[in-house]
């Protein structure tokens, strides 16, 4: 029983297998396509790789995912091929293995509507061309017939001598522009440097529209701005360069080598160059203002022109702009045959509106310096120096500078350049000439120095005197005040003295009158008293005289005199005995007299001693005796 069941199962399986084989069922997975190869049929036309009319060979259509019947193995061969996946941020290039030949002069097959190369029949019937294709695949999943198309993706790029970077979406960085060179299109017309811009190609992302619009092969005027672009690397090459920056204080004069035909708009009065509108060949009449500009510097040049004052030095120093890098000090020769060098600085200004005229006339700022300013300034000073001597040039430097400014301003005005100032810097006269001048000047300065020193000493003396006077001002003021006070005091004293004098005079008059009265009274009193005393004295004298006469008569003149002397001496305490020895004459009067005389002589020989005067007794008769002795 089991044996029959097994046989029935095997028979069933064999029947299913036979049915499957006979029916030609093909099962295609979700991520696959079925490439059909027909084994029998009419031969393909010459040059055709894919059958469109049921010919033998590769069939144009692919089998989508699912079950498909009618493809028995003895008539068809179905090969399962994977779908094409293009990742985000990448593109895929396509090479058509069949199709019409590419016309001469073209290198890429034209783009046809074929659903991104998924419809091989539409590609072939639409005139698709064999070879590299202008069209490419963007990010997504595609079912492409590998018999007709070869797809280059990042995964297989190396097999086709390509880099993965070539299949990445092209990105232009910020502040940059992309210079585009196309590899296909019509030739650039003779006389043109780059292909003229055409419309409708979406910044070179639609190559076929570029070609249909008449785009040229080669360098393009149009640039790519910052952003991401789907570009066919077989069609374009892009070089990134920085945007053209015009700094603050400058304008950019554009000299374009491409564009519409030249049409001068400068006017009849401007005969030294041509100016054109923006977008034409030539010097654009409108300069670029400060900022960043997306210009194609391969087909146009931007000459930066400073709109601030420009300083140019004919000297050993160089300004930051480097325009005067080739300038050197000017060598001139004076009228007296001396050669010397001088430094000159020239300040110029070019306005924004005049910048295109200047560039149209001379070509560049460096040409303006080398071909206009350098000969103009140098020749003026050479001509000017020949008219004067070295010393005259040195002494009249201000005049030379002013004359140079006037002359150079007129010369530069013809080039639409404004002359701001001309400055004469360092002058290097001959050393041998300057030595004599220096020696003379040193002598003059020394003399002047001595004069100044002398004047300083005089000033110092005056200052010291003034300082002393100033220091004495308090004393002077005090003295003046004292004088004033004294004057006031003197006046007061004078008045006081006058009062005192008057008072004294009155008092003196009163006293004088009183004294006069008293004196008169006293005089009268004394006169009367004197008269009385005189009478009394006379009477006393007469009495003494009478007594003396009586004593002389009684004792003798000598003896009486000695007695009187002894009496006087005794009254005054004079010692006679111890000091004086009497002679042998004895007690006679002659011995005493001799002793007295000896005493007198002794006193004359000794120094006089101040003795108290002896007041004679009033009314004593001895006084008269002493006088007589």
Image (tube, rainbow, N blue to C red):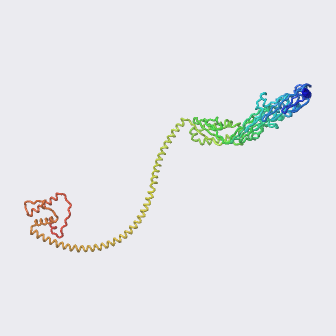
Q: Quadrant of residue 235?
A: top right
Horizontal side, residue 235 vs residue 537: left or right: right
Q: How many marks?
A: 0
Q: Quadrant of residue 551?
A: bottom left
Residue 441 screen position, x and y as percent: 52, 40
Q: Quadrant of residue 474?
A: bottom left
Question: In this orientation, does residue 167 appear?
Answer: yes
Residue 378 sits above or below residue 607 on the image: above
Identify the image quadrant of the C terminus. bottom left
Residue 585 sits above or below residue 106 on the image: below
Identify which residue is drawn at 91% across, 30% down. Answer: 69
Residue 331 screen position, x and y as percent: 60, 35
User: In the depicted view, which residue is nearer to us: 167 or 547?
Assistant: 167
User: In the depicted view, which residue is nearer to us: 191 or 212?
Assistant: 212
User: In the depicted view, which residue is nearer to us: 160 or 576?
Assistant: 160
Identify which residue is drawn at 62% across, 42% down. Answer: 402
Residue 129 screen position, x and y as percent: 85, 29
Horizontal side, residue 216 vs residue 54: left or right: left
Question: In this orientation, does residue 53 appear?
Answer: no
**Residue found at the very far front of the displayed protein:** 1
Horizontal side, residue 374 vs residue 506: left or right: right
User: In the depicted view, which residue is nearer to us: 626 or 612?
Assistant: 612
Residue 361 sits above or below residue 16 on the image: below
Residue 607 screen position, x and y as percent: 19, 57
Identify the image quadrant of the N terminus. top right
Horizontal side, residue 547 vs residue 231: left or right: left
């Amino acid at each position: 029983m089991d044996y029959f069941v097994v046989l029935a199962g095997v028979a069933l399986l064999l029947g299913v297998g036979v049915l499957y084989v006979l029916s030609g069922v093909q099962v295609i997975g979700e991520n696959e396509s079925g490439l059909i190869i027909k084994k029998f049929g009419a031969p393909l036309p010459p040059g055709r790789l894919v059958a469109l009319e049921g010919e033998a060979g590769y069939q144009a259509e692919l089998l989508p995912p699912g079950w498909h019947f009618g493809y028995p193995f003895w008539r068809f061969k179905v090969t399962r091929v994977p779908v094409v996946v293009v990742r985000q941020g990448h593109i895929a290039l396509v090479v058509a293995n069949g199709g019409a030949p590419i016309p001469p002069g073209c290198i890429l097959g034209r783009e046809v509507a074929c659903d991104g190369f998924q419809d091989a029949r539409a590609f072939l019937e639409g005139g698709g061309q064999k070879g590299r294709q202008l069209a490419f695949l963007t990010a997504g999943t595609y079912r492409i017939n590998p018999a007709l198309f070869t797809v280059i993706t990042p995964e297989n790029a190396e097999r086709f001598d390509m880099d993965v970077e070539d299949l990445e979406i092209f990105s232009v960085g910020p502040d940059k522009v992309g210079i585009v060179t196309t590899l296909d299109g019509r030739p650039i017309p003779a006389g043109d440097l780059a292909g003229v811009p055409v419309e409708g190609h979406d910044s070179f992302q639609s190559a076929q529209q570029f070609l249909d619009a008449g785009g040229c092969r080669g360098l393009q005027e149009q640039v790519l701005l910052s952003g991401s672009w789907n570009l066919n690397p077989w069609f374009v090459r892009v070089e990134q360069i920085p945007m053209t920056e015009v700094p603050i204080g400058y304008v950019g004069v554009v000299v374009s080598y491409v564009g519409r035909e030249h049409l001068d708009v400068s006017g009849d009065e401007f005969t030294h160059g041509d100016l054109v509108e923006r977008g034409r060949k030539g010097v654009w009449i409108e300069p670029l203002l400060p900022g960043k500009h997306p210009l194609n510097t391969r087909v146009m040049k931007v000459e930066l022109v400073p709109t601030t004052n420009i300083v140019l030095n004919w000297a050993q120093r160089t300004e930051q702009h480097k325009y005067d890098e080739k300038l050197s000090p000017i060598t001139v020769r004076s009228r007296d045959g001396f050669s010397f060098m001088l430094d000159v600085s020239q300040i110029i200004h070019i306005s924004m509106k005049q910048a295109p005229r200047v560039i149209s006339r001379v070509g560049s700022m460096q040409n303006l310096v080398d071909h206009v300013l350098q000969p103009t300034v140098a020749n003026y000073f050479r001509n000017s120096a020949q008219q004067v001597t070295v010393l005259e040039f040195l002494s009249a430097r201000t005049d030379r500078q002013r004359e140079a400014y006037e002359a150079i301003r007129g010369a530069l005005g013809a080039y639409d350049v404004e002359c701001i100032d001309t400055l004469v810097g360092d002058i290097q006269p001959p050393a041998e000439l300057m030595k004599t001048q220096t020696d003379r000047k040193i002598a003059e300065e020394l003399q002047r120095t001595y004069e100044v020193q002398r004047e300083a000493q005089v000033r110092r003396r005056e200052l010291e005197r003034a300082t002393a006077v100033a220091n004495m001002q308090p004393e002077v003021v005090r003295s003046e005040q004292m004088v004033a006070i004294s004057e006031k005091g003197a006046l007061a004293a004078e008045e006081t003295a006058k009062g005192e004098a008057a008072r004294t005079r009155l008092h003196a008059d009163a006293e004088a009158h009183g004294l006069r009265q008293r004196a008169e009274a006293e005089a009268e009193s004394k006169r009367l008293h004197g008269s009385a005393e005189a009478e009394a004295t006379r009477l006393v004298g007469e009495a003494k005289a009478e007594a003396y006469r009586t004593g002389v008569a009684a004792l003798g003149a000598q003896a009486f005199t000695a007695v009187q002397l002894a009496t006087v001496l005794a009254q005054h305490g004079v010692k006679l005995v111890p000091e004086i020895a009497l002679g042998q004459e004895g007690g006679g009067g002659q011995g005493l007299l001799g002793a007295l005389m000896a005493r007198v002589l002794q006193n004359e020989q000794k120094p006089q001693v101040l003795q108290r005067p002896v007041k004679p007794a009033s009314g004593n008769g001895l006084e008269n005796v002493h006088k007589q002795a």
